[in-house]
Structures are given as C-alpha cells and as structure tokens.
Amino acid sequence: MSVSVLGSGAFGTALAISLAGNGLVTLWSRDAQQARHMQSSRENTARLPNVTLSDAISVTADIQNAVDADVMLLAVPMQKLRAALTEHASVLAGKTLVACCKGIELSSGLGPISVIRETIPDAHPALLTGPSFADDIARGLPTALTLACADDTLSQDLQHELTTANLRLYRTTDVIGAELGGALKNVMAIGCGAAIGAGLGDSARAALMTRGFAEMQRFALMRGAQPETLMGLSGLGDLVLTCSSELSRNYRYGLSLGLNCPFDAQTTVEGVATARAMSEIATNEGLDMPISATVADLSHGLYSVPQAIETLLNRPLKEE
C-alpha cells in the first residue's frame, strides 16, 4: 500500500518520518510556503525542529499529489476534521481514511470515525490512537498504538502496512471505545495539570487519574464501548502518559491554569472542547461526571482553581 499523511503538524510529520522506513510517503501541508520549505530544508522547523525528513518523504501542498495513495492518514485537529473532509470530499471519496486525532466534535458530540462516515459515506474509516508523543515517534523510540476499524479484514491489512520499526499496532473493532478513550483522557490531563500547577501534589494527581478513569468508563460504556478497550492502550495507556508528562499539550494547559499563567493561544488543546461536549452529553443523559464538568467550567473561566478544588472535595461521600 502507498501512504499519504494529510497534515504537517508535529504528529503528522512524525508519522511520515516513521512510515518512511517502510517506503515512499507523501506529506501534505495546507500551507504552500511551509511545504516548499520542508521539501527543501528536509525539516519541519515550525512544528518538529531538529528532526530530519528522509528522502523517502515528499512534501506537497497539492492535494492531488497526496490522494493517489491507497491509505491516507488524517493528522488534523479534531475540531477541524469535518471542515477538512468537506473541503476535499470529492477527492477523498471511496478512500481508506485513518483519523489520527483525538476528541469529541463540539458541534455534534461525535468522534473522528463518525465524522468521517457523515461527511464521506463511501470512505473506509479507521482510527490510530494511543499513548504517543510526536517527538518520540520521530526519534524512532518504541511506541505502541491502537488501530480501530470496524472492518477487521481492512484492519489487518492496515496493521501490517502501518507497523514500522518503532510503531507497534494493536487492532480492535471497538471504534467507539478507541475514540472515547483517546478523547476523554485529554479532559483528565487538564485536571491533573491544574492540580500539579496549584501545588496539590502527586497524591491528588493519582486520585484525579483514578476517579477520572472511572468517569471515562461510565461515559464510554453508556455510548456502547466495550470495557476491555478502555483498559488498553487507547484508554488507560493514553491516560497515564497524558496525565504525567509536560510533553502533553493538555497537561501543560492545565498547569498554566493551576499556576495562573498565560498559555499559548496558538496551541491546540483538544481537551477544552471535549470537556464541554462531554459534560453536555452527560447532563442530557443523567450521567454523573463531576471531574469532567469541573474541568469544563475551569477551562471556560467559570471556576478558579481553588473553587474547582472546593467543588470536588465537598461532594457527598460515597462508595468507590
């Protein structure tokens, strides 16, 4: 199979670098100037500096040069996925599209595979998710990911084609569980970052991760996920990584809230929109999601960190 990566951010670039070990890869950038610079300099200085692009990677801003591939990895932010698919729907029709974003679309409450199905009904959708940082992948460090696809035959083909020297893929047909695990852990990472930034300590972080994981399970099971999926890479694995490293944008955003410091507005923080979408769905379904609701309010300035802490600590006592 030939492979293209649509989206030249840090993660898309890292995936292209890893996949180039298997053969030729096309990396598409919306920005023509950035594409020319990357093609000539062999580096993504804006998003993934100090990592060389191999000669097996061709960088282009012409979508027609990218859509001839058998498989296209969609490395665009969750809240921009629908617009990107709609814009290029005619050339993506019937293609195998592997979403590489995590989150819940704020406008619809849908995950990435569902958005692909709505916008391009004849596409063959899949999802690549799990505990991973772009820098680790680009530097060739070992990383294990979940490949979710309802069509297990296609999933097996993709598993073989997208596995690389440093990327090991585990497949599942539970696309709902994989979507939600990758999305909801970002919400918990914001909460953990805020706790550490506010000086609450590692014990508080452990409590937030544990009770946050319980919320993730409740929400995902309500949406039809399989419980074992949340215990895997796309759920628990991603939660552990994202809640414990400053390489996580969501964790860093939470840190800035806890420290009461400004945060770069140009940095994508998927957990903000996901927290809001998740809380609205939970309210409508009568689901108890106190951490998620608190993170949503905190992220939108409705709570200060001390108020958020007080709200959670003053909840009624209950069994675990």
Image: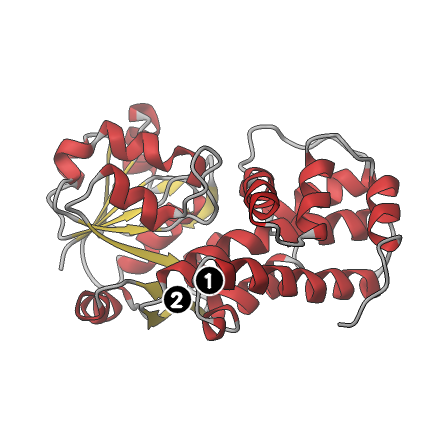
Point out residue 43 in the picture as x, y percentages from the top left corner.
38, 42
Alpha-carbon neighbours of circle 2 within 10 Å: few (<14), some, or many (≥20)? many
The reply to whether discs 2 and 1 touch (Cβ–Cβ < 8 Å) is yes
Q: Quarter of the image containing the N terminus? A: bottom left
Q: Residue at x 56, y 46 (%)?
A: 278
Q: Residue at x 33, y 42 (%)?
A: 115
Alpha-carbon neighbours of circle 1 within 10 Å: few (<14), some, or many (≥20)? many
What residue is disc 2 on? Answer: 146
Q: Which residue is drawn at 25% across and 37% down?
A: 119
Q: Foreground residue, 211 or 127? A: 211
What residue is disc 1 on? Answer: 130
**Residue 34 vertical position relative to residue 25 in the rendered view, above or below:** above
Point out residue 271 in the picture as x, y percentages from the top left corner.
58, 44
* Residue 92 horizontal side relative to residue 104, left or right: left
Q: Which residue is drawn at 65% across and 57% down?
A: 245
* Residue 294 horizontal side relative to residue 28, left or right: right
Calculate the distance from the C-alpha at mark 2 to the C-alpha at mark 1.
6 Å
**Residue 272 vertical position relative to residue 208 in the rendered view, above or below:** above
Q: Foreground residue, 195 or 275? A: 275
**Residue 42 vertical position relative to residue 225 in the rendered view, above or below:** above
